[in-house]
Amino acid sequence: MKKSFVSLAMAGVTALSGTALPMAAAHAEAACYVSETFPNERIVIDVEKQGVIVSNWYDLVALLFGGKQTAYSAHGKHVYATEDAPAEVAAQAATNWVYWMAATTGTVDTGVAYWGNRPGLQPTDTGAHMGLVSEWVRGDREMGGETWALPVTLDCGSTETSPTPYAWECQVYNEFGAYWGAVHYTKVAKAADDERCNLFQAVPGVAVPVFAEPASFGPQSYNGESK
């Protein structure tokens, strides 16, 4: 009965607008992102639609005239991986990959253009906005409790209206106080073929790594030298 009601409602909208309107998918595909600033890292998220972020009435109008603003939850992982492991590490590992992973959670909001000039119905901008926190916490008890990884916050935007756009421009900051500035992330075209996108760590490692590249979750230095 509920399905029939939805079908009739959509038929009514189609009749009023003269066009067929696709139903929004409740579940979006996962996306894996990489940046030139942090080439050894991957951020993999799966987003799920939560609902409108203005009002139900606004959402009804948006079905006909655009201007829809939608919130999505984002959950996934943040991976750092190096392929060339030190000899003493590689000898104890099943592969030559050395990697670490943290869980990441956040929100993606999207807003599309309103086709009209009625006050209050035009979003200031159109596109997507994302906030993520990757919960990194790593240290080494044998070195006096030295911490080498702390949580990272990403505040990102895109001119695309997809919750998983091709590109994000992110402000990146971690709890060491390291501000990395604007970091450009792009979607990995074939995530299934990218080993870093697919790596998974169940139990966090505590050994202090030697970073060949900067890490978003670490101090703003690596290999003992300032960035």
Image (cartoon, grey):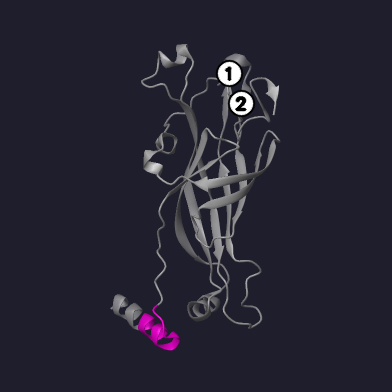
- Whether 19 is among the magenta residues is yes
Task: Please give the name of the residue rendered at 61% of the width and 77% of the height, measured from the top-left corner.
Answer: 121
Viewer-proximal residue among 128 and 37: 37
Please give the range of residues in magenta. Answer: 9-20
- List the residue tagged with mark 2: 148
Q: Amino acid at mark 2?
A: Trp
Q: Amino acid at mark 1?
A: Arg
- Circle 2/circle 1 CB separation < 8 Å: no
- List the residue tagged with mark 1: 141
Viewer-proximal residue among 208 and 124: 124
Name the secondary structure under disc 2.
strand
Q: What's the mark number on residue 54? A: none
Task: Please give the name of the residue rendered at 52% of the width and 80% of the height, measured from the top-left corner.
Answer: 65
- Whether 93 is among the magenta residues is no
Q: Quadrant of residue 199?
A: top left
Residue 24: % across, % down: 42, 67
